[in-house]
Amino acid sequence: MDLIKLLQREMNQEALTTRKMLSRVPPEKFDWQPHPKSMTLGRLASHVAELPGWVAMVVDTDELDFANNPYEPKDVKNTGELLDYFEDSLKNGKDALNRVNIEQFSEPWTLRNGEQVYSTEPKYDVIRMAHSQVIHHRAQLGVYLRLLNIPIPGSYGPSADDVTF
């Protein structure tokens, strides 16, 4: 199996769990946060929803410069909008993987804020990081939901609330 197909397969598998998790985020709790330094539930859920789209950004650009592209989180109003945002991001990420050329994976991609360079990594590494970010922030989202006493869906097996695979 080639590398692109592996990334596509991983994206599809993670989307199943991410979709289940996002569907449980209640809009009446979007402003809730477990700690003053933590993101709000709505902000975290929106971030999880946007992450598959990062694959397209990496495929289509050579850098993200916050000085020229200030980050504006998407303001979703309800769970339906959150899921729609996720599906759009997922489609963009999948489309990018469908058109990427394997040679692009070794090209550098830079994250910066003006002259301050945070990192320069091969595009493949940044795409893998985007996949990992979905998993990382989705786990945070699970903790938020647990603290709000909202049942957690299973991910790589059953959860205490969902014993099905």
Image (cartoon, rainbow, N blue to C red):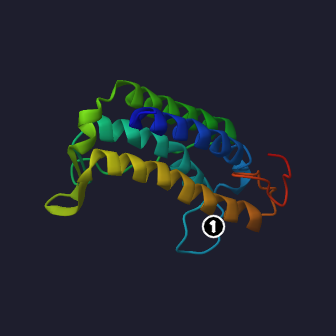
Vertical position of residue 65 compared to residue 78: above or below: below
Classify residue 105 as left or right of residue 54. left
Which image quadrant is residue 93 in? top left
Residue depicted at x 71% and y 43%: 20
Whether residue 111 is visible to the viewer of this picture, yes or no, is no
Residue occupied by mark 1: 33
Classify residue 106 as left or right of residue 91. left
Classify residue 119 as left or right of residue 140. left
The one nearer the camera, 103 or 118, is 103
Q: Residue 130: x, y in percent?
A: 43, 49
Q: Residue 87: x, y in percent?
A: 57, 32
The one nearer the camera, 157 or 71, is 157
Vertical position of residue 160 compared to residue 85: above or below: below
Which image quadrant is residue 161 in? bottom right
The one nearer the camera, 58 or 24, is 58
Vertical position of residue 60 compared to residue 144: above or below: above
The one nearer the camera, 161 or 87, is 161
Q: How many marks?
A: 1
Q: Residue 48: x, y in percent?
A: 54, 49
Vertical position of residue 148 compared to residue 81: above or below: below
Which image quadrant is residue 101 in? top left
Is label 1 in a helix, a strand or a loop?
loop
Residue depicted at x 48% and y 41%: 52
Question: In the image, what residue type sits under mark 1?
Answer: Gln
Whether residue 80 is visible to the viewer of this picture, yes or no, is yes
